[in-house]
Image (tube, rainbow, N blue to C red):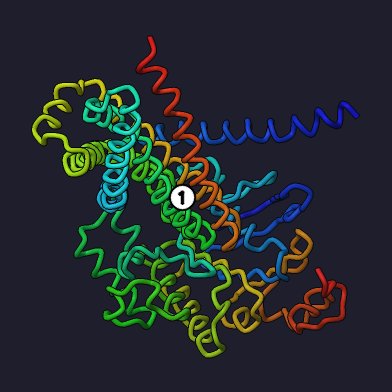
Amino acid sequence: MITLSGVKKSFGPNHVLRGVDMTIAQGQSLVIIGGSGTGKSVLLKCVLGLVTPDAGTITLDGQDVRRTDRDAFLARFGMLFQGGALFDSMRVWENVAFRLLRGAKAMPKDQARSVAIEKLRRVGLSESVADLFPAELSGGMQKRVGLARAIATNPDVIFFDEPTTGLDPIMSGVINALIREIVVEMGSTAMTITHDMSSVRAIADQVAMLHDGLIRWSGPVADMDTAEDPYLQQFIHGRAKGPIASLR
Amino acid sequence: MIALRLAQIGRPVLAVLAAFGRVTLFGFDTIRHLLSLPFYGREFGLALVQIGWFSLPVVGLTAFFTGGALALQIYSGGARFSAEAVVPQIVAIGMARELGPVLGGLMVAARVASSIAAEIGTMKVTEQIDALVTLSTHPMKYLTVPRVLAATLAVPLLVAVGDSIGIFGGWLVGVGTLGFNPSTYLKNTTDFLEFWDVASGLIKGAVFGFIVALMGCYFGMNSGRGAQGVGAATKAAVVAASVMILAANYVLTRMFFTS
């Protein structure tokens, strides 16, 4: 279980997070929605320790993430980055097997390659892409490779940062379905940030809306459409008029 | 009015001092990570090839033409006081002590600092460095340490090769254009050159290599957003590395040769 309480983060005069309180239960898929620049990525990076919060606490299974062994903590996580963040200089299989090839529990190269190919198959890619470089792949394929890398070590927690940004609707649907299948199959806890409502409906058990540095609304995905919060309704229906300023 | 003027002077001075402090801390951090495990041998090997082997043509050509031009200059300058015969000795000492390491360092700065800053800067803006962290890999250990160590070891070797090629360039011009006897030229070169002339140049090379890679990594890691940010980081890395090489050269020359 991941718990955030009173998490604040500012960049100079820009107060991005103003005291976020949130809980993600074990095995649950939480999707955080919110407009561009509302701090969704910052929140996710705070949990991973890529950004240090100014105030508040973040715990994983009751342990403060800042006081736990960093390597052991990160070993429990997988992350799919918005642009894939694949390493250009490495072949696809080396990207997927990156963690498997390093650290105290490093696998032999052949074994790591086999695991990488198995994970590539799991995300719908054939063995033939294993020896290509990321630049030789389409955007959708890069996302799949990023997904394969995120699940390579069967992590307890997987984060997805804008998993469908830049993809066509069909490929977005494929990625959404893959994420849902993998999260259910692996029993992982998942946190996704997106503003793509089709992703929300496909991936989420729970939804939280971040607005003005605070969690504006949270609840089960099934309750989202009937919720009375005007901010949430404006966002999920993509209305220009409402309490959220369209020019930010 | 005076306070305003002082503030206008003070602000950039403080900014430069702060930047120097950040670079110094980055350097200490690099050394700290160099002295602790894990060490990424594959990345070190790749960096060694990229920095050392692939810089060989540019350093070699620079040294060759510099040695040749130096021979011509010393001959024409020496002719003013009938000292044309010192061409082999001055070419050798000039290349080994000064021009080999400085020009080699500057060529490596142009080629390597820019490439390191652009590569790491691009990795930063495309979140590859964040990805490294989430994959339990420290970017300083994985990106900075192998490059800095490789450059510190490779540049002295490049300087040694550059010295030899530069002296050969001087020999070729001396023998081919200035009428020196080939074996006398070589004998004068080897007899005159002392161990410390060469060693001091190699030490300078190691320091310049450290500076080049450190600047590339520092500006890459602190790159701004987008193509413009990476471009600015690349430019800053080359400028800072070049200026620091020239400044370090003065300090080292003063340390080595004035007592």
Q: Which residue is at the far left?
A: B183
Q: How many marks?
A: 1
Residue B100 picture location, percent across and down: 31, 36
Residue A201 picture location, percent across and down: 62, 82
Q: A238 above or below A145?
A: below
Q: Is residue B176 left or right of residue A207?
A: left
Q: B116 above or below A225?
A: above
Q: Is residue A99 left or right of residue A211?
A: left
Q: Is residue A65 left or right of residue B214?
A: right
Question: Between residues B142 and A80, which one lies in front from this camera angle?
Answer: B142
Question: Between residues B120 and B59, which one lies in front from this camera angle?
Answer: B59
**Residue at the image point whose x is 14% and y is 22% from the top:** B191
Quadrant of the snapshot with the C terminus of chain B: top left
Place residue A98 in its image quadrant: bottom left
- Answer yes or no: is residue B198 visible: no
Q: Which residue is at the far top?
A: B259
- Answer yes or no: is residue A119 visible: yes
Q: Label 1, on which residue? A: A73
Q: A109 above or below B137?
A: below
**Residue at the image point whose x is 36% and y is 45% from the top:** B147
Quadrant of the snapshot with the N terminus of chain B: top right
**Residue at the image point whose x is 11% and y is 34% from the top:** B181
Could you tell me the amino acid type at mark 1?
Answer: Phe
Q: What crowding class fits label 1: few (fewer than 14 Cα within 10 Å), some (14-19), or many (20 or more)?
A: some
Question: Between residues A206 and B72, which one lies in front from this camera angle?
Answer: B72
Residue A22 picture location, percent across and down: 67, 59
Q: Chain ID for label 1?
A: A
**Residue at the image point whose x is 22% and y is 26% from the top:** B85
Residue B258 picture location, percent across and down: 39, 13
Q: Which residue is at the far bottom?
A: A170
Report helix, strand or loop for mark 1.
helix
